[in-house]
Image (cartoon, rainbow, N blue to C red):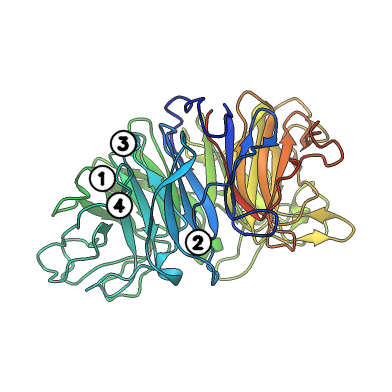
C-alpha cells in the first residue's frame, strides 16, 4: 500500500481556492451534509465552503496518485447502502472525473489498491470477485486512470477454454497445473519502479488447484496482453504486505502468522530476479515478562533500515496471548498488541522487551513530526469507564527526549474510543490528522494531534473544542493530504 511521494503540488487555482488541502471521506448523508469527499484547509484547519465531492453512497478509503493529480476513492462499506463505486477524482477541478463498479455486495468489495509510479494505472484486489470458468473467486482489476475504464481483456493460457472477466488478472496458476487457478487476493504491494506487483493470499482458495499462503508476482508491463506474466512463490504464513529494496531486486514479505489463522509472524525475503525465497523466515518475536516468546505483525513502516511492525500476538490456533502487564503500561484491558523494531540489515528484532500498544488488527501506521509514530488498529478493546481508550497508539521514537508525558521509547494511548481508519501527518506543520471513532455510536471523527506534545491541538478556530474543526460533522473514514 505504500506509494511514492513524487510529483509537485496541484494547481493553486482549485475550485475551493485552497492551496494546501486535505481530503476527508464522509460515508453518511445527514441533515447537515451529504456523503462524499470533504475539503479541509490543511494550513489553517478550516473546512472549505465548497460542497463535498460526490464519489458514491459510502466513500471510505482513498489513494493519492504519485503525481498528486488524482485521488482514487472506493465507496463500499458492506452495508445495504454500499454501491462499491470506484471513483477517480481530478484534484485540480475537485470533481469526480470517472467512476466504475466492480460488482454488487461482497463480490465488488476491496481493501487494497495500488497505483503505478507513472500514475497511469491502478490495480485493485477483489478477493470475492467471481470469475467465469474459474472454480474459486478472486481477481486483480486493472484500471486505466486516463480513461477511467477497465483495460482490455487478459486472455487465459491455452489449457483454459473460458477467458476471465475483462480487465482482470485472474488466470493465475503455475504452468504445471492443468485446471483453472484463483486465489482470494486481499492485499497488493507495488515496487518502487512499478515493474513488480505482489498479490497476497492469506490462505487457500476454494478451488481444486488452490495453494495455501501464496504470493503472486505480477509483471505489470504485460498485464494487458494475451500472455500475462505471473509467477508464484509459496511457503508463507498468511502474507499481508511487502517492502521493496530500492532497486526492486528484493521484497521483504510480512507474514501475519497466528493473528491471521497461521502459526508465526515473520519476515521473509524474496529474490525478485528468480522469484525464490532467500534463507529462512525471520520471526518477529520478543520475550515478555513471563519469558514467553510473542510474535506479531499485520502492518509495518520502514524508516531507513528500521522496519516498525505492529500486530497483536496470538497463540497458534488460539486467541490473544500478550498480557498488557508484560509492558510498563497500566490499563484495564487484559490483552495488548505489540510494536517491534526490526533491523533489515541483520534481519533480526532490535528491541529487547515488548513495546506494548493497543490490541486489535493493526492496519495504519505513519511517522509524524518530532519522531512520533502513530499506529492505528480496528476491533481493539474499547474501554470507557475508569479510563478511556481506543485503537490509537503513539510511540515516541526519540532516543533521549520526552514528548508531552511520553518518555523516550514510551507509548501513549489517547483517551478516545473507536477504530482508527485514517492517519495523515501534515507536512510543514507538527500536526497529524487522525480519523477515529468507527465502531462507536458517534462514528468517525477527525482529530488533530500536535506531535510536539502528543495531545490534541488547540485549534484557534474552535478554542472550546480542542483537536476538532468547527462545522466538520459526519461519519468520516479516511484522510489524505493532497498538495504536500
Residues marked 2 and 1 touching at CB (< 8 Å): no
Position of the N terminus, as image quadrant, is top left
Nearest to viewer (mark 4 / mark 3): 4
In the picture provided, is 12 more to the left or to the right than 47? Answer: left
- Foreground: disc 4 or disc 1: 4
How many C-alpha atoms fall within 10 Å of the one at disc 1: few (<14), some, or many (≥20)?
Answer: many
Q: Of tags 4 and 2, which is closer to the observer?
A: 4
Category of crowding for the residue at label 3, using alpha-carbon neighbours closer than 10 angstroms: few (below 14), some (14–19), many (at least 20)? some
What residue does disc 1 label? 220
Distance of label 4 from label 2 (alpha carbons): 18 Å
Say which of 340 and 73 sits in front.
73
CB contact under 8 Å: marks 4 and 3 = no
Within 10 Å of disc 4 (Cα), the crowding (few <14, some 14-19, many 20+) is some
Q: Residue beneath label 4, please?
A: 149
**Residue at coordinates 74% horizontally, 40% vertically from top-left?**
469
Instruction: Pick whichever of labels 1 and 3 is earlier in the sequence.
Output: 1
The tag on residue 76 is 2
Give the residue drawn at x 50%, y 47%.
Answer: 62
Question: Cβ–Cβ below 8 Å for labels 4 and 1?
Answer: no
- The local crowd at label 2, few if under 14, some if 14 to 19, many if 20 or more residues have their Cα within 10 Å, is many
Residue 120, by quadrant, is top left
* Residue 200 visible in the picture: no
Q: Nearer the viewer, residue 161 or 12?
A: 12
Which residue is the site of mark 3?
A: 249
- The picture places residue 131, in percent across and down from the top left corner, at 28, 69
Amino acid at each position: 500500500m505504500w506509494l511514492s511521494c513524487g510529483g509537485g503540488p496541484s494547481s493553486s487555482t482549485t475550485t475551493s481556492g485552497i492551496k494546501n488541502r486535505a481530503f476527508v471521506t464522509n460515508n453518511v448523508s445527514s441533515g447537515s451534509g451529504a456523503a462524499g469527499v470533504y475539503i479541509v484547509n490543511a494550513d489553517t484547519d478550516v473546512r472549505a465552503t465548497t460542497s463535498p465531492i460526490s464519489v458514491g453512497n459510502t466513500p471510505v478509503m482513498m489513494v493519492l496518485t504519485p503525481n498528486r493529480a488524482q485521488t482514487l476513492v472506493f465507496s463500499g462499506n458492506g452495508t445495504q447502502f454500499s454501491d462499491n463505486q470506484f471513483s477517480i477524482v481530478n484534484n485540480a477541478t475537485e470533481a469526480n472525473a470517472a467512476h466504475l463498479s466492480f460488482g454488487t455486495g461482497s463480490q465488488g468489495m476491496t481493501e487494497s489498491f495500488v497505483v503505478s509510479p507513472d500514475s497511469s494505472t491502478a490495480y485493485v484486489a477483489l478477493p470475492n470477485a467471481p470469475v467465469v470458468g474459474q472454480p474459486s473467486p478472486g481477481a486483480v482489476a486493472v484500471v486505466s486512470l486516463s480513461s477511467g475504464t477497465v483495460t482490455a481483456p487478459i486472455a487465459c493460457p491455452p489449457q483454459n477454454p473460458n477467458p476471465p472477466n475483462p480487465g482482470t488478472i485472474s488466470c493465475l496458476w503455475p504452468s504445471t497445473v492443468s485446471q483453472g487457478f484463483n486465489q482470494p487476493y486481499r492485499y497488493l504491494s507495488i515496487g518502487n519502479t512499478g515493474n513488480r506487483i505482489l498479490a497476497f493470499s492469506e490462505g487457500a482458495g476454494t478451488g481444486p488447484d488452490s495453494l495455501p499462503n501464496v504470493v503472486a508476482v505480477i509483471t505489470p508491463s504485460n498485464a494487458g496482453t494475451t500472455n500475462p506474466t505471473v509467477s508464484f512463490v509459496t511457503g508463507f504464513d498468511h502474507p499481508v504486505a511487502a517492502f521493496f529494496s530500492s532497486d526492486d531486486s528484493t521484497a521483504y514479505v510480512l507474514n501475519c502468522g497466528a493473528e491471521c489463522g497461521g502459526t508465526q509472524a515473520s519476515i521473509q525475503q524474496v529474490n525478485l530476479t528468480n522469484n525464490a525465497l532467500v534463507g529462512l523466515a525471520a520471526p518477529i518475536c520478543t520475550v515478555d515478562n513471563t519469558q514467553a516468546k510473542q510474535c506479531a505483525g499485520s502492518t509495518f513502516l520502514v524508516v531507513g533500515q528500521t522496519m516498525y511492525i505492529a500486530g497483536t500476538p496470538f497463540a497458534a490456533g488460539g486467541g490473544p496471548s500478550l498480557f498488557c502487564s508484560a509492558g510498563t503500561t497500566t490499563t484495564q484491558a487484559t490483552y495488548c498488541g505489540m510494536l517491534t523494531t526490526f533491523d533489515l540489515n541483520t534481519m533480526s528484532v532490535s528491541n529487547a522487551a515488548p513495546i506494548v500498544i493497543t490490541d486489535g488488527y493493526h492496519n495504519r501506521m505513519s511517522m509524524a513530526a518530532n519522531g512520533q509514530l502513530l499506529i492505528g488498529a480496528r476491533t481493539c478493546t474499547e474501554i470507557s469507564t475508569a479510563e478511556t481508550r481506543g485503537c490509537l497508539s503513539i510511540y515516541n521514537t526519540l532516543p533521549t527526549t520526552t514528548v508531552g508525558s511520553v518518555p523516550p521509547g514510551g507509548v501513549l494511548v489517547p483517551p478516545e474510543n473507536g477504530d482508527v481508519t485514517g492517519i495523515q501527518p501534515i507536512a510543514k506543520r507538527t500536526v497529524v490528522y487522525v480519523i477515529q471513532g468507527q465502531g462507536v455510536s458517534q462514528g468517525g471523527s477527525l482529530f488533530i494531534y500536535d506531535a510536539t506534545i502528543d495531545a490534541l491541538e488547540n485549534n484557534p478556530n474552535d478554542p472550546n473544542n480542542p483537536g476538532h474543526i468547527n462545522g466538520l460533522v459526519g461519519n468520516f473514514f479516511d484522510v489524505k493530504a493532497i498538495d504536500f
